[in-house]
Amino acid sequence: QVQLKESGPGLVQPSQTLSLTCTVSGFSLMDYSVHWVRQPPGKGLEWMGRMKYDGDTYYNSALKSRLSISRDTSKSQVFLKMNSLQTEDTAIYYCRRGFDFWGPGTMVTVSS
Amino acid sequence: DTVLTQSPALAVSPGERVTISCRASESVSTLMHWYQQKPGQQPTLLIYLASNLESGVPARFSGSGSGTDFTLTIDPVEADDTATYYCQQSWNDPWTFGGGTKLELK
């Protein structure tokens, strides 16, 4: 069945770079897009960007200068890198297949 | 960017019919999707492409609309429907979410 799972450090220091991995199973990254969405504690959802099935990427304009999404199709993994982290980047980070299946999310706290 | 506007909260009694609205700042055709998020859980898809019920979702949920005005209807509402509901459009880049509507049961 379709599954997505986010992984990464739970704690990142301010000004550092966040690296997250989304490992998928049950479908091919060459058939479906994978999106990253985040949710600060107690707040709403923010769409961050996507890796299309053809390898193209698109980013939220507010994050574009700090954000990079890549993939390794042989490992069924999609990667998120975001630099210059600040406390307001503290959030649960989700990956999602297209508009349907979501991973459980991973909490990232930005703090010294 | 396309702004999606939702009412922040609603309170209804079990057995009633509730409509949750989502208004877009520009046309999104029918590329609107609805999600339910319960506390401590990831969102789950309820309705895709404005009016299509996701597999496994109860038929009490339905969606309608096109262009700039969309509605999620729950009829009848059950206690388990207590959650926050989000709309998201995928017609215009970047994709955007509404602010969410928190549904509480009286």
Image (cartoon, coloured by chain):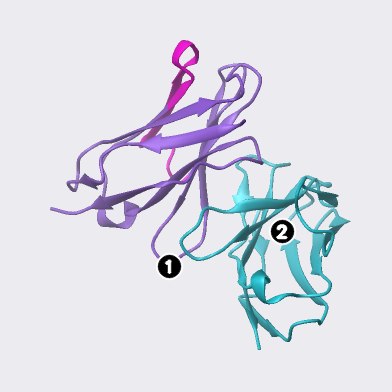
Chain colours: A purple, B cyan
> Is A7 placed left or right of B27 in the picture?
left
On what subunit does the disc labeled 1 rest?
A
On what subunit does the disc labeled 2 rest?
B
Query: On the image, numbered disc 1 is attached to which residue?
Result: A42
Task: State the residue in front, B55 or A14.
Answer: B55
Q: Which residue is the extreme one toward the top?
A: A74
Q: Is residue B99 visible?
A: yes
> In the figure, residue B23 lies in which quadrant?
bottom right
State whether discs 2 and 1 lie on one chain: no
Foreground label between 2 and 1: 1
> Is A45 placed left or right of B9 in the picture?
left
Q: Is residue A59 visible?
A: no
The disc labelled 1 sits on which kind of residue? Gly
Percent position of residue A44, x then y: 51, 61
Task: State the residue in front, B94 or A104.
Answer: A104
Look at the picture and state if B54 lies above or below A72.
Answer: below
Q: Which residue is the extreme one toward the left?
A: A112
> Is A103 placed left or right of A109 in the picture?
right
Q: Write the residue at 74% across / 82% down.
A: B14
Look at the picture and state if B40 lies above or below A11.
Answer: below
**Label 2 Cα neighbours within 10 Å, binned few <14 / some 14-19 / many ≥20:** few
Query: On the image, numbered disc 2 is attached to which residue?
Result: B25
Percent position of residue A85, x then y: 26, 45
Q: Write the residue at 66% across / 41% down.
A: A100
> In the figure, residue A82 lies in which quadrant?
top left
**Residue interval drawn in magenta:** A62-78
The disc labelled 2 sits on which kind of residue? Ser
